[in-house]
Image (tube, rainbow, N blue to C red):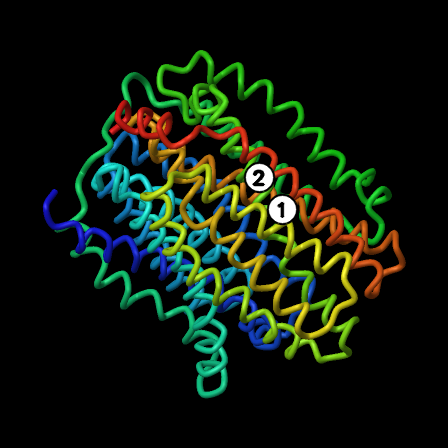
Amino acid sequence: MKNRNPVLWVLFLGVLMAAIDIAIIGPALPAIRDGFHTTDRAVVWVFTTYLLFNLIGTPLMAKLSDRLGRRDVYIADVLLFAAGSVVVALAPSLTWVIVGRGIQGFGAGGIFPVASAVIGDTFPPERRGRALGIIGSVFGVAFLIGPILAGVVLKFFSWHMLFWGPLPFALLLIPAAWRWLPSTGKGGKGKADWQGMLLLAALLSSLAYALNQLDAAHLAESARSPRVAGFLLLGVVLLPVLAWVERRAADPIIHPRLFGGRQLVLANALAFGAGVVEGSMVFIPALLVAAFGVSESKASFMLLPVVATLSIGAPLFGHGLDKVGSRRVIMLGTALAAIGTAMLGFLHLSTAAFYTAAILIGFGLSALLGAPLRYIMLAEAPAEERASAQALISVMTKVGQMLTGAVVGAVAASMGGGVAGYAASFQVLGGIAAVLFLLSLLLKRREAEQAAQRQTA
């Protein structure tokens, strides 16, 4: 394909549409709660339902794109997301808001992995890093403009107006995607793996629900409660059953070979670890409130350097992938993340120390989450499994993010909370980032990676 710029813009706008929705939901939740005269506990399901269906939709929609073609499934994802937005905007009750959020989450789950797979189908190996970096920068951009946009809309309009926003995106994206996106994929052979799809959905649902119900302040007690222990046990039981079904399926939803080979195992482990480190970012405002005595709103504002470096670092490191390969980029990223988190854990926090640590963490995460791990999967996974491989990276990252809440909260609570408690948590996270650096040393060198790219191009 000679003209790849329209393809990149279609993918960029689709990911931006979904990412802005994630960025605006935080400011919108209090308005939704007050609008329906409900409780904080009830309105949390607006966020939790989106997360759950997003987690389920990611591997399912990705697999459908491998079987049916990228363009059709990408358009279906955009349509689902827009339809869910309309349901939320017109919702007469909180129940309908939650239903709409589920539809939104399911559609959004497929947008990023399918977009990454399209880059693998469309761009030559020597240009994939830059393209993936541009797509990865969307999340930094979204979290810079999303809260500001939400604040303006909520000041002058009702919260419903926020959810009409995806419609212009969809009206622009659907005809553009139909014209420019290739109908690649269509690699599935044999009967669809409906058993695997249902088992995977049940496994991810049980895991997500259990982790979301954990009380970090009373971790052991909450882990023994039926609503947590029962669903964790269900996940443990379903995992070997899913593995057994996938080994026998003609076209498994997650092919066992995506866990085969050192490079793939390392990529999945790094994705999980990156999710753990990324998930810790939600606790930085609490640390800042305790350390500097600032308000919660100012503490959130102080996170802007992390967000800004994500938007800058993703394309920068994406360009580096094409020059030096994934190993060096990930080594640098994990080292930066380890130093940044360790600074939050071991140094006496001053404003200068915090901002230095925040910038290091932001650049470190952008060297992991933006493009490099997806770059590895494009090099290692066969063409007919590209979207499924990208979905696997997303799922591993999201599971890591969910686990962080329990880990950080439990460590902080065990140390009495406050500055000492959160510092101890970031000491643990610094150790996890250091382990990720050691894992990155085991990745393929540039020459071996280029050879793998030639085989799967």
Q: Position of residue 89 (x, y in %)?
A: 42, 69
**Residue 181 bears which disc, if any?**
none
Q: Residue at x 76, y 53 (%)?
A: 425
Which residue is label 1 attached to?
Answer: 276
Q: Residue at x 69, y 48 (%)?
A: 430
Q: Residues within 10 Å of mark 2 (few under 14, many from 20)?
A: many
Q: Residue at x 33, y 55 (%)?
A: 134
The Cα–Cα distance between marks 2 and 1, rounded to whole angstroms, is: 6 Å
Q: Residues within 10 Å of mark 1 (few under 14, many from 20)?
A: many
Task: Report the side of 281 relative to 10 (left or right).
Answer: right
For residue 254, which quarter of the picture?
A: top left
Task: Report the side of 18 relative to 209 (left or right).
Answer: left
- Identify which amino acid the numbered label 2 is placed on: Phe
Task: Report the side of 197 relative to 423 (left or right).
Answer: left
Residue lying furthest left in this view? 2
The quarter of the picture where the C terminus appears is top left
Q: Position of residue 174 (x, y in %)?
A: 21, 55
- Identify which amino acid the numbered label 1 is placed on: Val
Mark 2 and mark 1 in contact? Answer it, CB < 8 Å: yes
Which residue is label 2 attached to?
Answer: 272
Task: Report the side of 345 relative to 95 (left or right).
Answer: right
Q: Please tell me which residue lies in front, 305 or 197.
A: 305
Q: Position of residue 384 (x, y in %)?
A: 29, 26
For residue 189, which quarter of the picture?
A: top left
